[in-house]
Amino acid sequence: MKHSPENIIKFATRLAITSDLYRGIIEKRLTAHDLTPAQLAALTHLARRAMPLRVSDIARAIDVGQPAVTKMLIKFERAGWVTLSGSKQDGRVKEASLTRDGGMHLQKVHRSLMPELPSFLDNWSEEQLHHMTDELKSLSNFLETVQKLDVKA
């Protein structure tokens, strides 16, 4: 093992603390946008994939029941943030796509959730910011893989 168990535990503990702090702040601030964390996750997932997604795929990706995701998407469609259409392969299957307005709204929401972040990052070099972003992306990819394995189990 490359790293000591103690350092791995320290890392996992710090990750849990950071995750809990961030989640708590975001949950509180999302109320100003009439969004829940799950709704933000659905919009973000649609933006990240940038293609029509089946309701069932969104539900699985954000770990929320399909009926709840359907309600979210209907809300988003009424707001003009997504379009819902029948799948080209099977018209009975609904697919959602993020609209331009939805993407703009999502950017606005994300900017407003942590307005303190730019000043915190002022002391970081571009290289440090890119490095941290790359490391977080790697961690996110790892966690998505673990999540998929848990779903299969």
Image (spheres, rainbow, N blue to C red):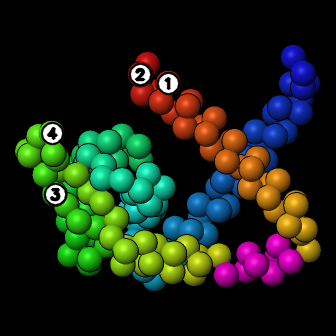
Q: What is the chief secondary structure element of the magenta stretch?
A: helix
Mark number for residue 114? none
- Residue 90 vs 44, above or below: the answer is above
Residue bearing mark 2: 152
Give the foreground label among 1 and 4.
4
- Residue 42 vs 60, above or below: the answer is below
> Does residue 50 appear in this view?
yes
In whole angstroms, how far apart are the C-alphas of marks 1 and 4? Answer: 27 Å
Badge 2 marks a residue whose secondary structure is helix
- Residue 125 vs 133, above or below: the answer is below
Give the foreground label among 4 and 2.
4
Query: If you read the primary sequence from the N terminus, does the residue marked by circle 1 or circle 4 appear first?
Result: 4
In whole angstroms, how far apart are the C-alphas of marks 4 and 2? Answer: 25 Å
- The percent position of residue 51, horizontal first and vertical second, equals 36, 53
The crowd level at tag 4 (other Cα within 10 Å; few <14, some 14-19, many 20+) is: few
Badge 3 marks a residue whose secondary structure is strand
- Say whether residue 116 is magenta: yes
Q: Amino acid at mark 3?
A: Ser
Query: If you read the primary sequence from the N terminus, does the residue marked by circle 3 or circle 2 appear first?
Result: 3
The residue nearer to you, when weighing 85 against 31, is 85
In whole angstroms, how far apart are the C-alphas of marks 4 and 3? Answer: 12 Å
Which residue is drawn at the image coordinates 16% and 47% (left, top)? Answer: 87
Query: If you read the primary sequence from the N terminus, does the residue marked by circle 1 or circle 3 appear first?
Result: 3
Residue bearing mark 1: 149
The crowd level at tag 2 (other Cα within 10 Å; few <14, some 14-19, many 20+) is: few
Q: Are marks 1 and 2 in contact (CB under 8 Å)?
A: yes
Q: Report whether 149 appears left or right of 116.
A: left
- Say whether residue 45 is magenta: no
Q: Amino acid at mark 2?
A: Lys
In whole angstroms, how far apart are the C-alphas of marks 3 and 2? Answer: 28 Å
